[in-house]
Image (spheres, helix red, strand yellow):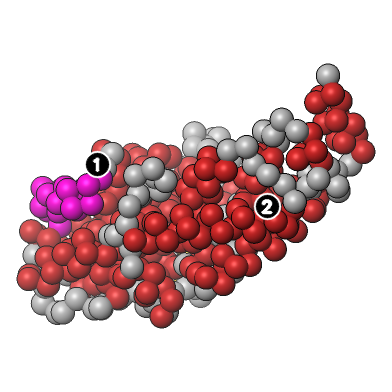
Amino acid sequence: MMPTLAPPSVLSAPQRRCQILLTLFQPGLTATTATFSELNGVDDDIASLDISETGQEILRYHQLTLTAGYDGSYRVEGTVLNQRLCLFHWLRRGFRLCPSFITSHFTPALKSELKRRGIARNFYDDTNLQALVNLCSRRLQKRFETRDIHFLCLYLQYCLLQHHAGITPQFNPLQRRWAESCLEFQVAQEIGRHWQRRALQPVPPDEPLFMALLFSMLRVPDPLRDAHQRDRQLRQSIKRLVNHFRELGNVRFYDEQGLCDQLYTHLAQALNRSLFAIGIDNTLPEEFARLYPRLVRTTRAALAGFESEYGVHLSDEESGLVAVIFGAWLMQENDLHEKQIILLPGMIASEKRRLSSSYAN
């Protein structure tokens, strides 16, 4: 019998992978290769490739594994914390890539499971959830975009479902101190009290920690407005980092405050990623390290004190992006010497000639 050829899928590969991952997070669903083939409108070979690439991505970025059972069904395995952070990333991505899937598949499955477990409707009623998110918005003095409001309402339902099933993330001591020290922790405790008033079981102590992390990851760092104690501490740490880099590289920056502001925006998020083992794309730093080895080494050396202060080790990918920021600010210097002293060593000859001639003309 001749195989039936499936028509080309109207979905892009990122859309298909996103729908695969969100399907795996749907409660009460057994998903096989055939499930994803039908869902995404592709043949089994393409579905298998999509599954493999999805597994590689969540392993690289979230230390999770995608495993197949004896019956051919797939499941995501790893810590509860890593799974929640993975869903945080992919559900937000889903609102951009496949909003209709979230509306027609993910949301109904979640609400159906909440109802099946006998959880009081006022917990997951959309109006009540939006009121809770609006309360958090006022407490944090942050205006959430419409998409973020929809995301939070849905994501909180997922956390509620896990809470009632006795599934809660675990934090190590460093992660715990970090979450407790953030601006959002007080609001997170308020959410915990809101659930506690109506819940059948007490809220685990680590649940407010995760709520604090959730809201902190939605906040875009602002070097001009952020005034929390931890934000002020980070700004001082970055000044020391820049001073150390300047001394090690024997360079100067014409706008050191501008450099510090950009580093603040990046490192505030990099600390979250490093503390909670969230990976980032690694293609840029690899190429950058090949072209500018001295810049990368100087950045890594300058970061040593910063890493020690926060008890983290920034990955090569993270430190590579910091090196990119330092390099970009060095390239803005009017004095060619400032560029040459740290950028030119290690560059290929053609790049040296091109850069030198561009500033000689």
**Does residue 80 show up?**
no
Tell me which corner region of the image, top left, top right, bottom left or bottom right, holds residue 88.
Answer: bottom left
Q: From the top left corner, tell me how far across and down residue 359 is, in percent.
A: 80, 26
Q: From the top left corner, tell me how far across and down residue 278 is, in percent.
A: 51, 62
Q: Which mark is residue 94?
A: none
At x 59% / y 48%, what residue is drawn? Answer: 46
Q: Residues within 10 Å of mark 2 (few under 14, many from 20)?
A: some
Q: From the top left corner, tell me how far across and down residue 11 is, in percent.
A: 49, 37
Nearer to us in this view, 250 or 42: 250
At x 30% / y 63%, what residue is drawn? Answer: 212
Q: From the top left corner, tell me how far across and down residue 306 is, in percent.
A: 56, 65
At x 27% / y 51%, what residue is drawn? Answer: 152
Magenta stretch in the rendered image:
124-143
- In the picture, measured across the screen, residue 15 lies left or right of residue 198, that is right
Q: Which residue does the numbered mark 1 point to in the structure image?
A: 143
In the displayed structure, would residue 9 be above or below residue 78?
A: above
Nearer to us in this view, 196 or 41: 196
